[in-house]
Image: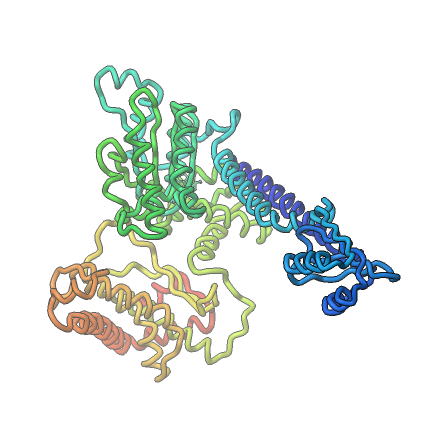
Amino acid sequence: MDKDKNKNNEKEKSKKLLISLIGLIILLVIVIAGIIIYNQKNKEDEDTLAYTDLIKEISYGNVEKVELTTGSRTAKITIRNEEEKTAIIPDTEAFITLIQTKVAEGNEIELIQKPQSFFAQLPATLFSILPTIIMVALFIMIFKMQGLGEKGKVYDETERKTKVRFDDIAGLEEEKGELIEIVDFLKRPEKYTKMGARVPKGVLLYGKPGTGKTLIAKAIAGEADVPFISMSGSEFIEMFAGLGASRVRKLFEKARKLAPCIVFIDEIDAIGSRRTSNNGAESENNQTLNQLLVEMDGFGSEETIIVLAATNRPEMLDKALLRPGRFDRQITIPNPDLKGRLEILKLHSKDKKLSDDVNLESIAEDTAGFTGAELENILNEAAIVATKNKHEEIENDDIEEAVKKVTVGLEKKERVISDKDKRLTAYHEAGHAVVSRYLPTQTNVKEVSIIPRGVAGGYTMYKSNEDKYYISKTEMQEKLIALLGGRAAERLVLDDISTGASNDIEVATQIARDMVMKYGMSDKLGPIDFQGKEPYEMQMFGENIGDKIGEEVKTLIDTAYNDAIILLKEHRDKLDKIAETLLQKEKINEQEFNQIFEQE
Ligand code: ATP
């Protein structure tokens, strides 16, 4: 919230600044244009004389007076017995020489050379300095905006101490345990330095987006009651060349003033990715990274500044960042496990009205792989669904609906679907469900539906997998069969295939590729990592290695597809039964699904 408020203020200020500068530039242009038009008009009022005519008049001896203004090519000419005229002189120097020769020859021509009046000079002067004015204005604007950015990030006197505490983080007990030390260090640095302990300088938090890295950094600052200064890695490089390094310098200048404090750099991979070549954007990136290293090496034990940085791409980071004295502590923030999810759901439902029928345990079970931010989002969606359904409190169904809304998309009951398409969807979904029923490693079916949701025409939801670290080859092979069960059913029953399987095919292909290229699960190719290798590196594995990988991926897919066809042929009665029930009821839940199989 604080962050948002600061950001808005910052945006407001830079917007105002931009508007006033644009206003100033427009005003200048109008003034200059006005003066030019005025001068032009004055000139048009006077009689003009062509240059050739002027030369003729001079040679006839009719010209009495010539008045020239320096820097201008218009001259005032007085011809005997006539009104004053103006003439444009192409080459003033040559013209003056001509007059002087005529005078020397005895002609009576009065030659007056006047300096230019200030008013006449003004437009030209303004015009010449206009680009400079615009440049200066732009620079002022950029630096102001940069300054605003930095100011906005530091919580001001009253706000800069965050109110977040460890109690606001659900789960992550071990991680909190590791970090409590940092809090203690910030509170009582002398206790550690007396023992000769080296000051921890940097802590890297690895974890997927939304796992609570920012929350943890804030909680450390909150617990230790020290200021929290934050900046995102991408902000260092999005500006102009050279600014990244200076922003790092300024950030640490500020930190030194506020020490003891926490500096939080989100998305550190944006500046901290491996230093490579020395050109363009990369060299800008390198400068920023070098500056960060200099700053981190620079502060000594008397300054208690702890730099916390977050990333979800640890493999991208420059090794120099991880050396002792820099980010020498690395803490992985995992996706929450079952217990963690339950705690996050409990924490974020505290301020929501939940009905007694809500079973957070079962919601936690159904949301394996979800991050804290996603769980928070689900509860928020549930409150919206409950309001839409005119419920007094959030009911269990509202939360389950929210989970589906977040995972598959919004239910589209109103969409008109032809009978042919309905039949196709029914068989496609029944295909997935029946096949997975006979695959031991696959989880039970939770719900099958042919009501469109999001972009999907129908869906089969499975019970969530218990949290586990490893997936076996058999499990992956069976996953492929389950994924291709939809397409197999279409082929078997309707004797044609449709576009409905595109997502299944995409996922299946990715799994098969990973099996071969990442997890070394192909017997023919062995346990080798083929991912992201340059062509010359691939050559190491023999000629046509690409073809061989392709063949292996194709074999995995073909085998799975054939297995799905075999399973469906064998259980054709169940396939028909599920599809028929779907056409009648549109949705089948877990019990109804299981009943069909127990009916024998
Ligand atoms: P990103 O990498 O996108 O910056 P992040 O890992 O820093 O993400 P946060 O911004 O800290 O994630 O988390 C987003 C929100 O998710 C938090 O504000 C909080 O409401 C919720 N959240 C995430 N993890 C937890 C948790 N363990 N306990 C309570 N709330 C959590």
Percent coordinates x, y for residue 352 in the rendering? 52, 40
Count the marks.
0
User: At x 42% / y 42%, what residue is drawn?
Assistant: 243
Residue 288: x %, y % from top left: 35, 41
What residue is at 16 percent from the left and 62 percent from the top? Answer: 537
Residue for point 49% across, 79% down: 419
Tell me if residue 177 can be seen.
no
The quadrant of the rendering that contains the C terminus is bottom left
Residue 578: where, in percent of width, then height? 38, 71
For the view shown, which residue lies furthest in the right direction?
81
Residue at the image point whose x is 42% and y is 38% from the top: 231
Q: Nearer the viewer, residue 219 or 500?
A: 219
Give above or below for 568 relative to 9: below
Q: In this orientation, which residue lies closer to the viewer: 306 or 140?
A: 140
Residue 479 visible here: yes
* Image x and y of residue 233, in percent: 39, 43
Tell which of 92 and 314 is nearer to you: 92
Left or right: where 500 falls relative to 27? left
> Relative to 492, does residue 214 appear above or below in the rendering?
above
Q: In the image, is 571 to the left or to the right of 427?
A: left
